[in-house]
Image: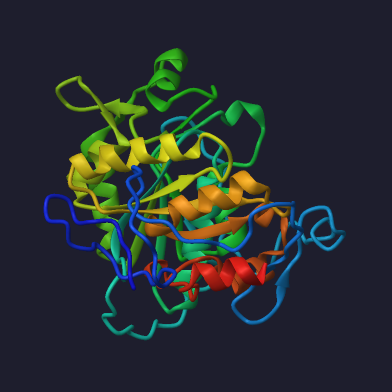
Amino acid sequence: MTTALPTPGTGAPAGSDATPRDLPATDDHMPAAASTGHDAGPRHPAMPSSDGDTVPNPGDGAADAAVESGAGEASVERDRPVAATAVSEPEPPAAPQSLPGEPGEWRGAVLVTGTDTGVGKTIATAAIAAAAQGAGLRVAVIKPGQTGTATGDPADAEVIARLAGPDTVRTLASFPDPLAPLAAARVAGLEPIELYSVVDEIRAEADKHDLVLIEGAGGLLVPMGLRPSGEPWTVADLAVTLDAKAVVVARAGLGTLNHTALTLEALDRRGVPARIVIGSWPAAPELVHWTNLTDLVPHLAGAIPDGAGAIDPGVFRRSASGWLTPTLYGVLDDWRTWAEEL
């Protein structure tokens, strides 16, 4: 039986992810549940990759020895305030093979947002990009606004380029302080990000790529910049303007059900189809993680292992499809089997 997020206003499924069979209906805010078969005790699983390799868990030695940079990755120029930066692969990829129009495939503009900041949006975006490129798609990743550049941490575009190596990675505007983009622009005395300039940039990339992933900042309703009218705009507004679908990256732990349900409700009210990806599935999941997984399964399209961003880029790219369902170009189609094999 397939359980999926209803298409807004119709009750019809918006995708075709295969989920555990014989799921009972529930009266909870999340529509259905599946038994994982795990009811107590921490586990120490290793996430399987799509080619049979095992992805090392953080702290097991293999992950600690992971290569920090790989050959053939897209190079990323460090962003400057409000300056658009383009990132290109050293060599253009071979022409991709056309994929069949299977139900649930997401092409065009796909927004990657989160239930909060720090939930794993960047690594999830990299995983989706890697899986899609592995399936033969031309992929672009756009970050409308990067904040916190003064901290010295790698920019999100740099992380995505290193791990996934998509055809194109761009950051449209950067700001020094780790704040919401609109607040960061005001504090720095810089021009805020204008909604329709972002829309134009994304549409231009969509003309040249099969899939354009747009990584937001923080959560769905964070003020990103200003409209021409002077009114703030959010990632939700961007999704509506682009007629895009959305991936919601969520936590695995306590509190995620409310945050995730609120985000899905906000998207549904705007007519934006959505799926969930768990941004960091723990190496030793506890009871709360298993019960949350049960409640999230009906909308779930992936789960990224904790520490995936630290593994070798080659292993990351080979493994990414094993963390995602076919909707996001992965091979994971039965959460019951996945959970029982961990």
Image colouring: rainbow
Q: Does 104 appear above or below 24?
A: below
Instruction: State which quarter of the image contains the N terminus.
Output: bottom left
- The image shows residue 75 at horizontal and vertical percentages of 58, 57
- The image shows residue 248 at horizontal and vertical percentages of 40, 47
**Left/right of residue 37 with respect to residue 114 in the rendered view:** right
**Left/right of residue 65 with respect to residue 220 in the rendered view:** right
One can see residue 85 in this view = no
Q: Residue at x 37, y 23 (%)?
A: 182
Give whichever of 120, 175 is nearer the camera. 120
**Left/right of residue 327 with respect to residue 332 in the rendered view:** left
Q: Does 7 appear above or below 238?
A: below
Q: Residue at x 46, y 16 (%)?
A: 188
Give whichever of 110, 55 is nearer the camera. 55
Q: Residue at x 28, y 61 (%)?
A: 206
- The image shows residue 235 at horizontal and vertical percentages of 31, 37
- The image shows residue 190 at horizontal and vertical percentages of 40, 20
Q: Quadrant of residue 109?
A: bottom left
**Left/right of residue 96 with respect to residue 312 in the rendered view:** left
